[in-house]
């Protein structure tokens, strides 16, 4: 490897020789002295070079030609060029950026750059068109370091509990959720469909006796909407566990995972998030508040907002308001809305013992937006078939799925959670397009 | 949660009351006593029940009706049914299975099962048709626990090095590798394609200044072949790092990851793997042997096998033989074949300085089969365009990819590795279909 020092690590080094490498963020090319802000994935530092503008006409001093060449190459640097610099590190409190600078000895341009077409304040659409440049901004870079830490913390919890990581197929013979939002693939002589969720396959693991599983992977929805919360491809965080008594067990695991994830992010990136996003990452306290959906609708109605829907469901504005209410009342950023009506839940959600109009299910709302749906699943095959019929589905099309139940399956449940939504709400961003590496929407397939 | 004890944990418990839950593996229904082997995700235990075949005609003793009912329900148990049992644990050295048994108190059938259509010795095709039942076998279950441990160890290395986890889109506007093996998706009014690898997008992260990234996710190849090593969808382990000097730096990271993965698997599952697969997991020593491809072909030719190919490439039999040679000569299960000819490598592999007929690339062979391809990438855009033209590609179709280079990118490289292949060869299995959760092939879309 190129023996470079990460910029975040040079502060701890003594004055003396150092090699750094990264891209040129700015150049201040003054007559007598040149300054370059060099950034790498860990931070930024100031490079300095006393300019040599012409060869001494009185006689050529030692190294003068090299000095002139160095000055000229710094003058010619374009923003975004990747360079490798060897020089002398000097700690100097007067330097605003980190209290140090590097006096350039040699500078190698390993990759020049065309002039950047975007700025930090360009429109989101334009930034997305140039996502690879947009991601050079410290804020965007931090989002994905936060993502890395968050996911690793979740996996740590799952693994400590003995859950098994699975990779479920994204190519399916039929729909896993609604047929309405299904992508069709030419599959040799026939057709395949892109998985809308790993739902069926994570349930299959329960029938296979895996006990508990998790997966972080892509899910696909042919959803033509253009909101800040929707994408045609998104990363879904999924888990499913056996031998639960109700959805309460799923919520308990859900809480534990989020607490671990937020704790790890706060510990590792709390300061940087405060600095770049102006946000304090709060580790949620357990238990998270739980409110039955019907009660939540009543609460927002009592506060002046009647959800304008004919069915039993919430709407985004209602979710925003109940979240506000919970924050004021309980000081909590999360709330589980529970016991959704069977009429607005998929056929595979278990219904209440004694009241089939309600399900053992929940949505998790975080800072006003739904980030997850969880439920106990119906594991009694006769009841399941009945519920599918009740939804107007043809059980014959679900044969492979129903087989999982016919050959024995323990009581089980789980949830799916959108990674980009969690990050968006954690960092108070306004769109999942900011917290997705490369957003995919109806008109967005590039880069 | 159902307060059950995992079967692996009951050995450490004292004699007394215990609750276990799992599925019925066998029932031995003798006249005077009934035995049930109950399995859960952690192990198996023997349940025992003194049979009560009829009510005492002389008078009804206390609990006799319950005892009769229990006996009858055990007689009626079908293999694969999920049951929850509360009873008395008794350690008894005479019991072969773990030196303990559980005398049944109550037994609840939570999910009955149809008669299982497969056995451990059913054909692979039949087992795959009933994959959820096949996965109940301890060997298959172990494969996915090994997978979990292996991946977690790899991620530990990446994260300790500060690499960033990315989720790259699987929906693309064009091909990422050959156009020949591309799945086409109906995408609203147009077309999209399934990513054959995250190649372009992990390189994009280098231009974005991420320094180093990793991803474990699905990749898709419309490959009509039916070998034991190919699938139309597979889990690809990918990494890409900046500021390398050559492919040697990529190989060094590759070794480090594999050593960590194998060490974790050996530590956590070594005994079980020995018992169930008869395989000793060997942690590979570093450095792995490296042999230039041309030299490897000469070695196998000298040993009597001339690779029957017109081009410069190896074939599977050649890979098997060079691997055998390396094992005999160096006692190593791994070998890097390096410096592949440019003619058989993609346009984005960097070519040798001074000899453009060879590339800075490698394949990694493990126990006779290729599991990975790695390389330094060409980061100089003019050279890259030239190499694309050289391969008969139209640079205009690569515009979005070439932009990553036009705006600056450091020298970089990485590899992609097939997860199922690593597991297959580690456990001496004969097909990736055994080590894939749900195999996808040209005629395999179900379950």
Image: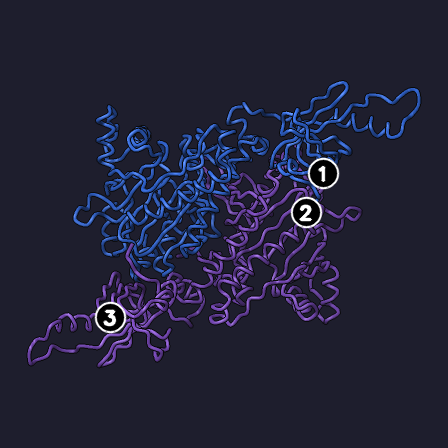
Chain colours: A blue, B purple
Q: Position of residue A221 (x, y in %)?
A: 41, 40
Please say whether residue A114 is visible from this viewpoint: no
* Crowd band around label 1 with a 10 angstrom C-alpha radius: few (<14), some (14–19), many (20+): many
Mark found first going from the N terminus, 3 or 2:
3
| Relative to A157, residue B23 above or below | below
Q: What residue is disc 2 on?
A: B376
Number of disc labels: 3
| Relative to B203, residue B11 above or below | below
Closer mark to the observer between disc 1 and disc 2:
1
Most foreground residue, A15 or A343? A15
Q: State the separation of the CA atoms marked 1 and 2.
A: 22 Å
Instruction: Tell me the SS state at disc 1.
Output: strand
Disc 1 with disc 2 on a shared chain: no
Please say whether residue B65 is visible from this viewpoint: yes
Label 3: chain letter:
B
Residue lying at the far top of the rendered structure:
A31
At 21% across and 47% down in the image, what residue appears? A352
Disc 3 and disc 1 in contact, CB within 8 angstroms: no
At 22% across and 43% down in the image, what residue appears? A358
Q: What residue is disc 3 on?
A: B104
Disc 3 with disc 2 on a shared chain: yes
Q: State the separation of the CA atoms marked 3 and 2.
A: 63 Å
Q: What residue is disc 1 on?
A: A19
Most foreground residue, B187 or B272? B272
At 19% across and 72% down in the image, what residue appears? B72
Label 2: chain letter:
B
| Relative to B342, residue A103 above or below | above
- Asked whether, in this view, residue A278 is left or right of residue B3, the answer is right
Instruction: Tell me the SS state at disc 2.
Output: strand
Label 1: chain letter:
A
* Crowd band around label 3 with a 10 angstrom C-alpha radius: few (<14), some (14–19), many (20+): many
Instruction: Tell me the SS state at disc 3.
Output: strand
């Amino acid at each position: 490897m190129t023996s470079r020092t990460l910029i975040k690590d040079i502060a701890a080094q003594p004055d003396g020789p150092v090699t750094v490498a990264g891209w040129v963020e700015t150049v201040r090319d003054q007559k007598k002295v040149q300054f370059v802000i060099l950034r790498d994935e860990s931070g930024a530092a100031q490079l300095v070079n006393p300019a040599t503008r012409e060869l001494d006409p009185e006689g050529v001093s030692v190294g003068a030609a090299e000095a002139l060449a160095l000055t000229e190459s710094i003058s010619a640097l374009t923003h975004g060029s990747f360079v490798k610099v060897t020089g002398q590190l000097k700690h100097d409190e007067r330097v605003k950026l980190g209290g140090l600078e590097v006096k350039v000895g040699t500078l190698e341009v390993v990759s020049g750059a065309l002039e950047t077409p975007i700025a930090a304040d360009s429109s989101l659409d334009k930034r997305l068109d140039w996502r690879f440049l947009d991601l050079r901004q410290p804020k965007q870079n931090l989002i994905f370091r936060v993502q890395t830490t968050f996911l690793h913390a979740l996996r740590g919890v799952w693994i400590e509990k003995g859950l098994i990581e699975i990779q479920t197929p994204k190519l399916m013979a039929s729909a896993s959720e609604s047929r309405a939002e299904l992508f069709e693939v030419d599959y040799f002589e026939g057709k395949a469909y892109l998985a809308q969720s790993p739902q069926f396959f994570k349930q299959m693991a329960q029938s296979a006796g895996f006990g508990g599983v998790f997966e972080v992977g892509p899910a696909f929805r042919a959803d033509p909407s253009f909101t800040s919360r929707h994408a045609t491809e998104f990363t879904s965080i999924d888990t499913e566990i056996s031998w639960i008594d109700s959805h309460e067990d799923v919520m308990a695991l859900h809480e534990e995972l989020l607490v671990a994830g937020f704790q790890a992010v706060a510990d590792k990136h709390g300061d940087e998030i405060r600095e770049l996003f102006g946000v304090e990452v709060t580790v949620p306290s357990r238990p998270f508040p739980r409110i039955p959906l019907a009660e939540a609708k009543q609460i927002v109605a009592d506060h002046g907002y009647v959800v304008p829907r004919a069915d039993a469901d919430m709407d985004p504005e209602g979710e925003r308001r109940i979240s506000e209410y919970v924050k004021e009342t309980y000081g909590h950023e999360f709330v589980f809305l529970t016991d959704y009506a069977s009429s607005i839940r998929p056929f595979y959600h278990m219904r209440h013992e004694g009241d089939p109009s309600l399900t053992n299910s929940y949505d998790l709302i975080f800072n006003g937006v739904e980030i997850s749906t969880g439920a106990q699943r119906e594991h009694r095959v006769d009841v399941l078939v009945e519920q599918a019929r009740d939804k107007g589905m043809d059980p014959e099309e679900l044969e492979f799925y129903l087989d999982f139940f016919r050959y024995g399956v323990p009581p089980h449940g789980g949830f799916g959670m959108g990674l980009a939504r969690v990050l968006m709400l954690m960092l108070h961003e306004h769109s999942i397009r900011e917290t997705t590496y490369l957003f995919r929407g109806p008109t967005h397939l590039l880069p």
